[in-house]
Amino acid sequence: MLSNDGERLTLENEVSLEDGVEVWLTKLKTGVEDTLRTMLSNIIQDVNSNQPLEDMVFKVLKLLQLAE
């Protein structure tokens, strides 16, 4: 997905356009939620495994920019 501001979110799973707009929007919403959930989970794993602070800050900022 690409926003008007140039922010890009690569979804974990492809979202099909086969079933009509309402179904597609529901699948898209679920895909975005799942992707953001995975990104957040990865950040938490990094915290728990003592990753460098700079790496974690970059990931958190990326996640927050996508959620705006």
Image (tube, rainbow, N blue to C red):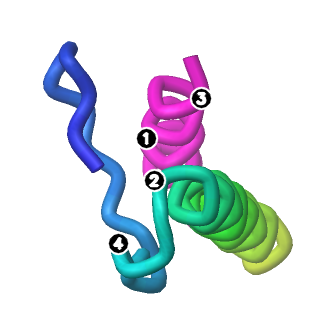
Specify the segment rendered in magenta.
50-68
- Say few, some or many: other residues with alpha carbon within 10 Å of mark 4 (under 14 / 14 to 19 / 20 or more): few
The quadrant of the image that shows the C terminus is top right
**Number of the front mark, 1 or 3:** 3
Q: Give the distance between the C-alpha atoms of the residues marked 4 and 3, in whole angstroms.
A: 23 Å
Q: Earlier in the sequence, mark 4 or mark 3?
A: 4
Q: Give the distance between the C-alpha atoms of the residues marked 4 and 2, in whole angstroms.
A: 35 Å
Q: Give the distance between the C-alpha atoms of the residues marked 1 and 4, in whole angstroms.
A: 33 Å
Instruction: Give the quadrant of residue 41.
Output: bottom right
Q: Nearer the viewer, residue 66 or 57?
A: 66
Q: Report the residue marked by disc 1.
A: 58
Q: Report the residue marked by disc 4.
A: 17
Residue type, numbered disc 4: Leu
Where is residue 46 drawn, in percent x and y?
Answer: 68, 70
Q: Earlier in the sequence, mark 4 or mark 2?
A: 4
Residue type, numbered disc 1: Phe
In the rendered structure, are the residues bearing label 1 and label 3 in contact, judged by CB atoms less than 8 Å apart?
A: no
Q: Report the residue marked by disc 3.
A: 67
